[in-house]
Amino acid sequence: MKNVKKNSVRSQSNKIPLDYIIVSILSNLSYDITTIPTAKPQLHSFFFNLRSKYKILSKVPFETFYYPYSEYVEQAFDNLELSSLINKLNPVMQKYQLKKKELKQFYENVIKSKLGKKDVKDLEKLSKEFADYMH
């Protein structure tokens, strides 16, 4: 990913940046899902609620005010947008457009080889839960 700030939250087993974890989740969504909401409460709550279930998310720090918020989740989505793997749809920017081909290529060519078998399975499960939660 070009022009990306390094994110210090990583999976415990393989030192995978949170950006890569999110790319893995998005790249494994079914092909009919081409957009996701940009709503911070919805996105951040998803990751917050699953931290205890998935070790790969357990180190993501959150603050809780009106809704769980993580600077790291926010930065990861910003990085994906800067890298042109996702972009906000106009005019009201309520959805991210997923660049499915680019996400899948980045996952297959760069990320997947860095993951352990358990991480790959967990990320596939996370993708299904993400799809259910967001749609």
Image (tube, rainbow, N blue to C red):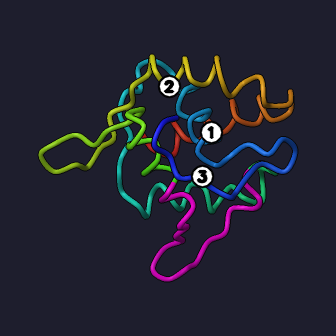
Q: What element carries label 1?
A: helix
Residue drawn at x 80%, y 35% is 119
What is the crowding at mark 2: few (fewer than 14 residues within 10 Å), some, or many (at least 20)?
Answer: many
How many dots with numbers? 3
Q: Is residue 86 above or below residue 13?
A: above
* Number of the label disc, if any, that sits on residue 6: 3
Q: Using residue 47 as the reference point, say whether residue 132 is left or right of it.
A: left
* Number of the label disc, if any, that sits on residue 103: 2
Q: Is 129 within the magenta? A: no
On the image, the x and y values in percent for residue 127 come to 60, 34
Residue drawn at x 72%, y 58% is 51
Q: Using residue 113 as the reference point, say whether residue 27 is left or right of it.
A: left
Q: Is mark 3 on a helix, strand or loop?
A: loop
Q: Is mark 2 on a helix, strand or loop?
A: helix
C-alpha distance separating marks 2 and 3: 18 Å
Could you say which is closer to the camera, residue 66 or residue 72? 72
Q: In this view, does 7 lie above or below 124?
A: below
Residue drawn at x 39%, y 43% is 82
Kindly identify the amino acid type of the residue bearing the numbered disc 1: Tyr
The residue identified by callout 1 is: 20
Residue drawn at x 76%, y 36% is 122
Hey, which quadrant is residue 81 in on the image?
top left
Q: In this view, does 78 lie above or below 41?
A: above
Q: What stretch is highlighted in magenta?
A: 57-75
Q: Using residue 84 as the reference point, say whether residue 89 is left or right of it.
A: left
| Among the two numbered marks 2 and 1 on one chain, the one whose residue lies closer to the N terminus | 1
| Among the two numbered marks 2 and 3 on one chain, the one whose residue lies closer to the N terminus | 3
Kindly identify the amino acid type of the residue bearing the numbered disc 3: Lys
